[in-house]
Image (spheres, grey):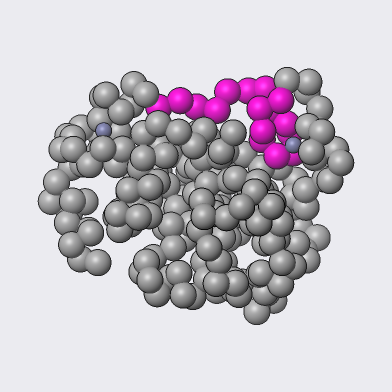
Amino acid sequence: MLRSLLPALFLPCCPGCLKNHSGNRIFCTPCAARVELLQPPFCPRCGYPYSHGLDCPHCTLEPPPWQCAVSIFPYSGPVASAIRLGKYGNHPWIFSRLGELMAHIAREFSPRYILPVPTARSRWLKRGFNPAAILAREIACRMYNSPVSLLGNHVIRTDDHKPQAAKSKKERSTLPSDTFVLRRTLPAGGPILLVDDVMTTGATLKALSLSLATDVPVFALTLARTL
Ligand SMILES: [Zn+2]
Ligand SMILES: [Zn+2]
């Protein structure tokens, strides 16, 4: 674990390529040149690129249990490399850097609470960290004018889930309804922002959102999404 932190402690590194990189920008110049943003127009409910100004067909058929989901980047290029390096190369500091990129978008939701998508206990023990929790913490630290609270222990993930990348398309599109269990009453008050690193089918965010059984608005923000 400590060894994985060394690059962040002693070497200014680019999270996209792990090469030395000095300067204030998160990515090195070659990586930054290849970073793409998801470009509007989007479906207003799920954030999927959709050009008709209405809910996309998927959301029309099955409205998601949140108000609005937004992703910042397509899951490709240096952003995808950074996420993979962070998760599978055991570099949790990468998610601290990437969380900085999410904070200004998170402010637009004016959340009162931020809930990172929980990871299963077995996964946490194996990896030692939850990327979503690191992203959420970085976002919360940067909500300068509207303090938020992290809902770190209110929901647990019960499944010993396979990585999304290892699942079939059908497995990715649905999760058992008891995947997430609310173990503490949610505090009363304002909107809740769900945070995760990657959105694929939206099934994880959907299951988590439903588990909350709350009347307050729920939004979702992910760093990247597959297209
Ligand atoms: Zn780079
Ligand atoms: Zn949609």
Q: Position of residue 201 (x, y in %)?
A: 65, 46
| Rendered-image quarter of ligand 1 | top left
Horizontally, residue 133 falls left or right of residue 171, namely: left
Tally the numbered discs.
Answer: 0
- Where is residue 103? Give x, y as percent: 48, 43
Image: 142 above or below 215: above
Residue drawn at point x = 66 percent, y = 35 percent: 47
Q: Is residue 45 magenta?
A: yes
| Magenta-drawn segment | 35-50
Q: Can residue 141 be spotted in the picture?
A: no
Q: Work out which quarter of the rendered image holds the N terminus and state it.
A: bottom left
The answer to whether 180 appears left or right of 130 in the picture is right
Residue at the far right in the pictured view: 61
* Image coords of residue 64 (percent x, y): 77, 48
Q: Answer above or below: position of 22 versus 209.
A: above
Q: Quadrant of residue 41?
A: top right
The answer to whether one can see residue 151 in this image is: yes
Q: Position of residue 170 (x, y in %)?
A: 69, 52
**Residue 60 placement, left or right of 49:** right
Residue 12 in the magenta stretch? The answer is no
Q: Main secondary structure of the magenta part?
A: loop
Residue drawn where x is 43% and y is 57% of the image? 131
Toward the left, the furthest residue is 10
Q: Quadrant of residue 32?
A: top left
Residue occupying the point 73% across, 33% down? 44
Quadrant, the C terminus = top right
Residue visible at 36% across and 34% down in the picture? 78
Q: Depth check: 132 or 186 in front?
A: 132
Task: Work out which residue is located at the far front of the displayed protein and give it.
Answer: 168
